Amino acid sequence: MRVMGLDYGDRRIGVAVSDAFGWTAQGVGIVEKRRDGSEMETFAKLLQEHEVSEIVVGLPKNMNGTIGPRGEICIAFAQDLQQKLNVPVHLWDERLTTVAAERTLLEADVSRKKRKQVVDKMAATLILQNYLDSKTKR
């Protein structure tokens, strides 16, 4: 079974999925947040479509390791996912993943407009890949 990685943002949630072996992460897109919370239905479809057995949500921590208001929002989102989708949900320290994604896109000379469209998906991919890498080092 596969693992799904999510980068939770104010407007968009980046989505990545692992390969069947749990070795590599691939970005699959973004999910637009909705006021009515209907994005949960989209996640349920993605779980089924990609045969996902667990989810990793990026947890933004402060540089000193504490959890601020943004982190608390992500924790609540992760708990909501676990309750509504009935799969294990893990939180993963995502410090600087969006910065790393932006830097990679800048180095690749991707235009500002295109960067905005893919940075969330790329951040989700980095979160998931870091999580997968930590599992294989055991």
Image (cartoon, helix red, strand yellow):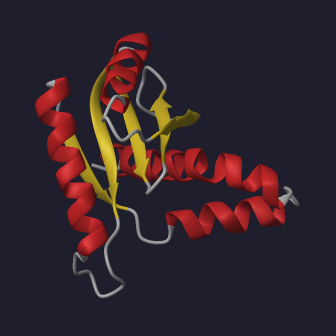
Quarter of the image for residue 81 reads: top left
Q: Nearer the viewer, residue 10 or 103?
A: 10
Left or right of 126? Residue 40 is left
Asked if 19 appears above or below 74 in the picture, the reply is above
Quarter of the image for residue 104 reads: bottom right
* Residue 33: x %, y % from top left: 43, 42
Total marks placed: 0
Asked if 105 appears above or below 43 in the picture, the reply is below
Asked if 50 appears above or below 79 in the picture, the reply is above
The structure residue drawn at horizontal position 53% and vertical position 45%, both measured from the top left corner, is 125
Q: Quadrant of the N terminus?
A: top left
Q: Nearer the viewer, residue 125 or 119?
A: 119
Asked if 99 appears above or below 40 in the picture, the reply is below
Quarter of the image for residue 43 reads: top left
Q: Nearer the viewer, residue 40 or 90?
A: 40
Left or right of 69? Residue 104 is right
The structure residue drawn at horizontal position 74% and vertical position 55%, both measured from the top left corner, is 115
* Residue 7: x %, y % from top left: 44, 50
* Residue 42: x %, y % from top left: 40, 23
Farthest residue in the bottom direction? 64
* Residue 36: x %, y % from top left: 31, 35
The structure residue drawn at horizontal position 25% and vertical position 77%, both measured from the top left corner, is 68
Q: Nearer the viewer, residue 82 or 65?
A: 82
